[in-house]
Image: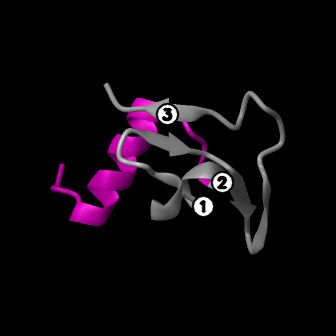
Amino acid sequence: MPKLPELARTVVTVAAFTGLGESELRELLWDDYNGEEQSVRRSVWRTHVRPTKTLKKAPTIRRP
């Protein structure tokens, strides 16, 4: 299996460790990361950006 480009490896790693779906991954922003936690506040479907559907889908991901 060929090695993935850096950006693809980063996305795959974040998806694997967080369990986020594609729509949440596409809308992660640096502004939502404070050095310890990543807040998931939005999701995107095609070109429509909206808040996450439920509170369950709006986690704060903490760095170990």
Foreground pick, 62 / 28: 62
Looking at the image, residue 47 lies above or below residue 28: below
**What amino acid type should be assigned to the residue bearing mark 2?**
Ser
Image quadrant of residue 23?
bottom right
**What amino acid type should be assigned to the residue bearing mark 3?**
Ile
Q: Which region of the structure is painted magenta?
A: 1-22
Question: In the drawing, does residue 24 fall left or right of residue 30?
Answer: right
**What amino acid type should be assigned to the residue bearing mark 1?**
Glu
Q: Quadrant of the C terminus?
A: top left
Foreground pick, 52 / 23: 52
Picture residue at 74% right of the left edge, 27% below the top = 56
Picture residue at 68% right of the left edge, 50% below the top = 41
Picture residue at 49% right of the left edge, 44% below the top = 38
Q: Which residue is mark 1?
A: 27
Secondary structure of residue under mark 1: loop
Q: Which residue is mark 3?
A: 61
Q: Position of residue 5 (x, y in %)?
A: 22, 65
Mark 1 vs 2: CB contact within 8 A: yes
Question: Is residue 32 visible from the viewing direction of this image?
Answer: yes
Q: Position of residue 6 (x, y in %)?
A: 22, 63
User: How far is mark 1 from mark 3, CA to CA?
Assistant: 15 Å
